[in-house]
Image (spheres, rainbow, N blue to C red):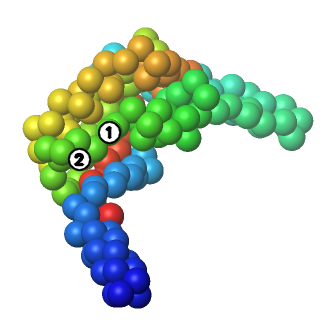
């Protein structure tokens, strides 16, 4: 009798483990489709800097000194603490809710010329609950610590895309 009771308890315990609801998990992509956005005014300034650099290099070449100009032409936008910290903050703040649906939430982020997160745009989202939560996350002060991108030391906007995927465990 004891063996039968033990068997029934074990069987019910094991079946209850299998009956649990399938939970959702989430993960993030890396930054994708990163691109600079220069206005007409910025482009004029950048072209002027390029022209000055070429003239200076020609002058150096005429002197035959063997010297050359070393100048960073592109500096991407940077998050204080690095991209890993940026992704980690989003990951920790995003919570899969009971209303979440499986799918991809694709967000385009624009960093402005004045070291700020200028805009987010949803290219795709899995459900309204996740969309609202992501909007709230990007409004947090701790996600607005950026240094602007620069082309030839001229501040420009930069865009990138990041995805938050929701899947069944």
Residue 124, percent from left and from top:
16, 47
For the C terminus, the image quarter is: bottom left
> Most extreme residue toward the left, as rendered?
128
Q: Helix or strand or loop: what does disc 1 sit on?
A: loop
Vertical arrangement, residue 39 with respect to residue 18, above or below = above
Q: Which of the two residues, 35 or 125, is positioned nearer the viewer here?
A: 125
Residue for badge 2? 105
Report the disc number at residue 104. Answer: none
- At label 2, counting other C-alpha atoms closer than 10 Å, the crowd grade (few under 14, some 14-19, many 20 or more) is many
Disc 1 residue crowd, few under 14, some 14–19, many 20+, Cα 10 Å: some
Would residue 78 be found to the left or right of residue 42 on screen? right
Residue ID for mark 1: 95
Does residue 141 lie above or below 97 as drawn? above
- Residue 111 percent coordinates (x, y): 38, 25
In the picture, measured across the screen, residue 104 lies left or right of residue 91, that is left
What residue is drawn where x is 15% and y is 36%?
129
x, y percent for residue 163: 31, 48
Residue 123, picture quadrant = top left
In the rendered image, the residue lying farthest to the front is: 1
Viewer-proximal residue among 95 and 62: 95
Q: Residue at x 61, y 29 (%)?
A: 81
Q: Residue at x 32, y 39 (%)?
A: 95
Can I make out residue 100 in this image?
A: yes
Q: Work out whether mark 1 precedes mark 2 in sequence or the reverse, and give the earlier one.
A: 1
Q: Which circle, 1 or 2, is nearer the viewer?
A: 1
State how far apart marks 1 and 2 are (Cα): 13 Å
């Amino acid at each position: 009798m004891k063996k039968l009771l033990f068997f029934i308890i074990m069987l019910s315990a094991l079946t209850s483990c299998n009956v649990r609801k399938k939970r959702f998990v989430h993960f993030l992509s890396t930054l994708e489709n990163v691109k600079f956005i220069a206005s007409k005014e910025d482009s004029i300034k950048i072209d002027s800097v390029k022209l000055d650099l070429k003239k200076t290099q020609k002058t150096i070449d005429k002197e035959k000194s063997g010297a050359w100009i070393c100048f960073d032409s592109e500096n991407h936008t940077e998050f204080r603490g690095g991209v890993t910290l940026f992704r980690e903050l989003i990951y920790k703040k995003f919570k899969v809710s009971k209303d979440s649906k499986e799918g991809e939430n694709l967000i385009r982020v624009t960093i402005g010329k004045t070291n700020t997160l200028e805009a987010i745009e949803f290219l795709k989202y899995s459900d309204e609950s996740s969309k609202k939560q992501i909007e709230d996350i990007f409004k947090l002060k701790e996600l607005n610590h950026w240094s602007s991108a620069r082309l030839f030391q001229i501040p420009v906007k930069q865009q990138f895309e990041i995805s938050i995927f929701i899947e069944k465990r």
